[in-house]
């Protein structure tokens, strides 16, 4: 905790002063370029990964970068997205998963679990990833350990993108070309970021024209 307090002092003395003009503009309102929905995992730092400044990203975070379908009660994730689209005029929405995701590990291990969970609220929340679990069962039975967890994280990005489409304002604006959805995967060990290419049915590294064979990010049974 002391390190965090020291960090606040450093920000006030140095960090804020270096961007004082920027914060002066931001006090009058925000005009973010994109809405990024990502995991609450402490290793994911959206502004660091995208080299973006305060005010550029409208960030929605929760366990497993999940977006419950429209109509679900207590849906703060979709409420935030709705605000981003309607009130802030954001046109690009990104769901970003990551390797080594603890939520996806809990999801795939839930099949083997017996007895009550130590984290019942987490497991209840992960019901919004039931489709992800079914896809993993159907297509990734040959995987174990980290490859299985990472495959689940990739598929979960695509499932949550479909959930986004259930929000009426998203469905309407997608059909008229006013909103674009993007699926990203962040590899913690390398710092690489991959985007989902629907025509190829794969996650492709930014800067590459196609996914590299053996990079572990091809998506089973997905295309278009």
Image: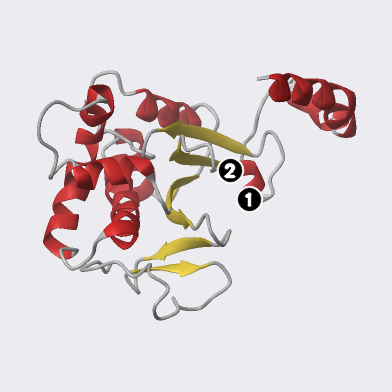
Q: Are marks 1 and 2 in contact (CB under 8 Å)?
A: yes
Q: Say which residue appears at 33% left-offset and 40% top-offset.
A: 103
Q: Quadrant of residue 147?
A: bottom left
Q: Say which residue appears at 85% left-offset and 33% top-offset.
A: 19
Picture coordinates of residue 68, whole percent (x, y): 27, 33
Image quarter hosting the N terminus: top right
Picture coordinates of residue 85, whole percent (x, y): 47, 34
Residue nearest the viewer, comparing 59 with 2: 2
Residue wearing tag 2: 46
Q: Is residue 72 above or below residue 172?
A: above
The answer for how far apart the CA atoms under marks 1 and 2 are is 6 Å
Report the side of 179 relative to 107 (left or right).
right
Picture coordinates of residue 223, whole percent (x, y): 26, 69
Residue nearest the viewer, comparing 144 with 172: 144
Q: Say which residue appears at 64% left-offset and 42% top-offset.
A: 47
Image quarter hosting the C terminus: bottom left
Do we see residue 142 in this rendering? Answer: yes
Label 1 sits on a secondary structure element that is helix
Report the side of 13 relative to 207 (left or right).
right
Q: Say which residue appears at 23% left-offset and 65% top-offset.
A: 143
Q: Quadrant of residue 119?
A: top left
Report the side of 129 relative to 211 (left or right).
left
- Residue 50, disc: 1
Q: Is residue 161 above or below residue 88?
A: below
């Amino acid at each position: 905790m002391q390190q965090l307090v020291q960090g606040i002092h450093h920000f006030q003395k140095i960090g804020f002063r270096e961007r004082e003009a920027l914060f002066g503009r931001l006090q009058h309102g925000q005009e973010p370029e994109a809405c990024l929905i990502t995991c609450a995992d402490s290793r994911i730092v959206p502004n660091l990964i995208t080299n973006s400044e305060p005010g550029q990203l409208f960030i929605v975070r929760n366990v497993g970068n999940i977006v419950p379908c429209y109509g679900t009660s207590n849906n703060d994730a979709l409420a935030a997205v709705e605000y981003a689209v309607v009130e802030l005029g954001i046109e690009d929405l990104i769901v970003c998963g990551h390797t080594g995701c603890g939520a996806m590990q809990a999801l795939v291990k839930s099949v083997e679990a017996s007895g009550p969970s130590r984290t019942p609220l987490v497991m209840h929340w992960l019901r919004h990833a039931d489709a992800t679990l079914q896809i993993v069962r159907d297509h990734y039975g040959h995987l174990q350990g980290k490859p299985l967890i990472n495959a689940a994280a990739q598929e979960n990005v695509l499932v949550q993108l479909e959930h986004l489409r259930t929000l009426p304002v998203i469905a309407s604006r997608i059909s008229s070309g006013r909103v674009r959805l993007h699926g990203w995967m962040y590899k913690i060990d390398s710092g690489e970021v991959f985007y989902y290419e629907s025509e190829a049915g794969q996650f492709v590294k930014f800067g590459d024209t196609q996914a590299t064979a053996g990079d572990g990010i091809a998506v089973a049974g997905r295309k278009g």
